[in-house]
Image (cartoon, grey):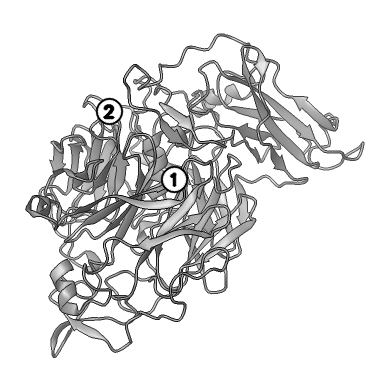
Amino acid sequence: MRPSLLALSFLLVAQASLPASPVPAAPPIAGTEAGATPARVMEYLGRGVVAVHQPDGAVFISWRLLGTDQADTAFNLYRTTGAGPTTETGPFSSRPDPVAGTIKLNAAPLVAGTWFLDPGASLQRETTYFVRPVLAGQEGAPSTAFTLRADTPPQPYLSIPLQTPVGYTPGDASAGDLDGDGEYEIVLKQEQRPLDNSRAGTTGDTLLQAYKLDGRLLWTIHLGRNIREGAHYTQFMVYDLEGDGCAEVACKTADGTTDGTGTVIGDPAADWRQPDSATVATSDASGATTTTAGLVARLEGRILSGPEYLTVFAGRTGAALATVPYEPGRHPDTQTPSTEQMKEVWGEGYGNRSERYLACVAYLDGEHPSLVMCRGYYTRAVLAAWDWRDGQLTRRWLFDSDAFAANRAYRGQGNHSLSVADVDDDGRDEIVYGAAVIDDDGSGLYSTGWGHGDALHVGDLVPENPGLEIFDIQERFDQQGLSLRDARTGRPLFAIPSVKADASGGDKGEGPGRGNAFNIDPRFPGAECWAAGSGMDGLYTAQGERFLEHRPRGFPTNFGLLWDGDLLHELLDQNRIVKWNWRNGAVDPLLIAHSCIANNSTKATPALSADLLGDWREEVLWRTRDNRELRLYTSTIPTPYRLVTLMHDAVYRLAVAWQNTAYNQPPHPSFYLDESAPLPPRPAIRVANP
C-alpha cells in the first residue's frame, strides 16, 4: 500500500533528526564483473541543490544522489544567513532571529532521502544552502550553493528571465553542462513563424540561445533563412560528445548560419528559398491543392536546394567547432536537384518527405557517445552516425533503407520521433526508429513492417518480460493501432487495432495520433497503455487487457513524469500535472502552472521535462504567456525513496537529449519502478573530467 500524502507529511521533521543508522547496501553495479562492457562515460554532475520558499514560510531543499556515490553516502545540510537588522518585522518576525553565518541544519547525517524541510530560515535576508557528502564519518567537499535572495516570495518555481527578440516565441529546450561547472544550462529554440512540412510559406529565422539558470544569456546562434522553421527541421543535440566535461551543441546548418561568436557558415548572401509563385505537380494529397491543372503543391518558402551542413558548436561560447556536409543530402549527385530527381529519391518533389529530420545521441561502442543525424521516414530513411573526438568530426557509419534490397524492409517505418536503448543487451545502443530498430553497427536489427507512427515509448514496461519493451502507435489504419513489443526481437506482446479512421482534419484517414505508456495504476504490473484518435479509447494493462472502457474527461495522452514522491508516474499535459486516481476513476490535479503555456499546438508539450535539479523527481520547464520567462517547476512533496538522479541512467539521459526532436516524447528510465519491485541498481558509469 502506498503511503498517503498525509503519512508522508510526518517525514518532514524526521529528516532533521534521523539517527545515523546503517544504510542497506545498494545492489551491485551492473556490468562490473570480469569481462563486462566498459562503463559508459556520463557527464560529471554536482549536487544540483535547489531551495523553494513555500507558502507557509518554510524552505524545501533537495539535492542529487549521483550514480558514482557509494551506497552508504550520507549528507550534512548547511544554511548560510546573510547579515540583517537585529530586530526584523514582517511575516517571519515571530521566529527566533537567526545568527548571521553558517550553521548545520541536521543533528545527524541524512541517510533516508535527499531532501529536507527548513522551517527556521529568515527569508528577509539572503539565505544560502549547500550540502557536504559524508562517508565513514568524514565530510567531503561542499556542493555548489543555492541562494534565495532577500525577500524571495513564496513560489513553486525558479524564474529564468529570457531575452526574447521581438516577434519570437520560445519553443523546445534542452539541457547540458555547457561550461563544465557540474550544473545544467538551458539551450532554447526561439522561432518566429514555424510551419509544418506539408504547408508552404516563408518562415522566420530560428535562433538557439543558451542560458544559465539565473537567466544570464551565454550566446545566440542564428540558423538563418536557409534553415526552414518548424518542428521537423531543427533537431538540436546538447551533449558532452567528447568527454571533456562541457557539452557541445550539434544541429543542421546552412549558408548564412551565424555561430555564437558572429562567424558565418557558408555564403551569407545565399537565399535558397523557393519563390512565392512556384508550384509542383504531385500525387501526394498532404499539403497539396486541387487546381484546373490537377493536384499541385505550393513551394513558396520551401528550401529544396543549396548546401546542407552539420555543425558542432562549443557549449561555452556557441562557436562553430566543425562543419561537414550533411549526410545524406537531398540528392546523391547534386545540391540543386530537379523535381523529378527528388521524386526518384524521396517519392515527391516538394520536401514533405525529404525534409523531415530526426536526431539522437547513442553509445554505439558502449562507452562513448556518438551523434546520429537522420533524414526521412515516410519512404526512404537514412541515419548517419558521427564521432566527435579530439576536435575532429568523423562519420562512423551510414544506414540507408534504399542502399540494397535487404534494407528496403526499413522504408516507411520511422516515427515523428525516435528512441535510444541497448535493446539486445550487448552493452551498445540501438536506435529505435519507430517500427524498426537499427543496430549499433549501422545494420538493421529488425523491422516489424508495421509502418509509420507518432508516439513512441521505450523502457522496462512489462516486468515479467526480460529486457526492454517498445510501445508504439501506428498512423496507418491497421491492426497495430496501439502495440507493445519485445524490444530485442520485435515480437508482439499485444496489439489493439484502430477501430475507425479519423474522418476529418489533418489526420483524415489515419490511425491514432497520441499514445502513452506509464505505470500509473498500482493494481496491475507494468505500464498501463492508451492511445487517442481513430476511435481508440480506454486503458489497457501491460498484458493488453482493457480494464477501463472509457478514459475520463481530461485524461492526458501526451507526457508523463515522476513528481509526487511515490513510484508511480503522474501525467503532464498543457500547463498541468495530474494523477490517476484509480479508486474513483478520475484524475486529480497536482499542479497548475499559472501564467504558463505549453508548446507545439495540440501536442501541448513543455519546453522540457527532465530531472534537472534536486532529488530524483523530474522538473518541468514552461514558458510564460508573455514569452519573457521560463519557469522551472520542481516538486516539494516529501518522498520516502532515495534514488540516484535519473540523469545518470543512460536511457533516460539520452531521452532528454532527443526530447526536442520533432514530436516531443517524454523520457523513460531503463528500469522498472514500482513498490512491488526492487529499487534499481547503481548504474555502471564513470563520469567525464570536470
What residue is rendered at 54% in x and 38% in y? Answer: 635
User: Can residue 170 be seen by looking at this rendering?
Assistant: yes
Of residues 498 and 690, the one drawn nearer to the viewer in this rendering: 690
Check the image and report above or below for 338 versus 70. below
Q: Quadrant of residue 231?
A: bottom left
User: Can residue 575 be seen by looking at this rendering?
Assistant: no
Whether residue 23 sits left or right of residue 81 in the image: it is left
Marks 1/2 in contact by CB < 8 Å: the verdict is no
The N terminus is located in which quarter?
Answer: top left
Binning the other alpha carbons within 10 Å of mark 1 as few (below 14), some (14 to 19) or many (20 upward) gives many
The C terminus is located in which quarter?
Answer: top right
Whether residue 119 sits left or right of residue 36 in the image: it is right
Type of the residue with mark 2: Phe
Dot 1: what SS? loop
Check the image and report above or below for 585 versus 96. below
Q: Which mark is residue 241?
A: 1
Dot 2: what SS? loop
Check the image and report above or below for 209 versus 97. below
Q: Quadrant of residue 99?
A: top right
Q: Which mark is residue 524?
A: 2
What residue is rendered at 42% in x and 40% in y? Answer: 653
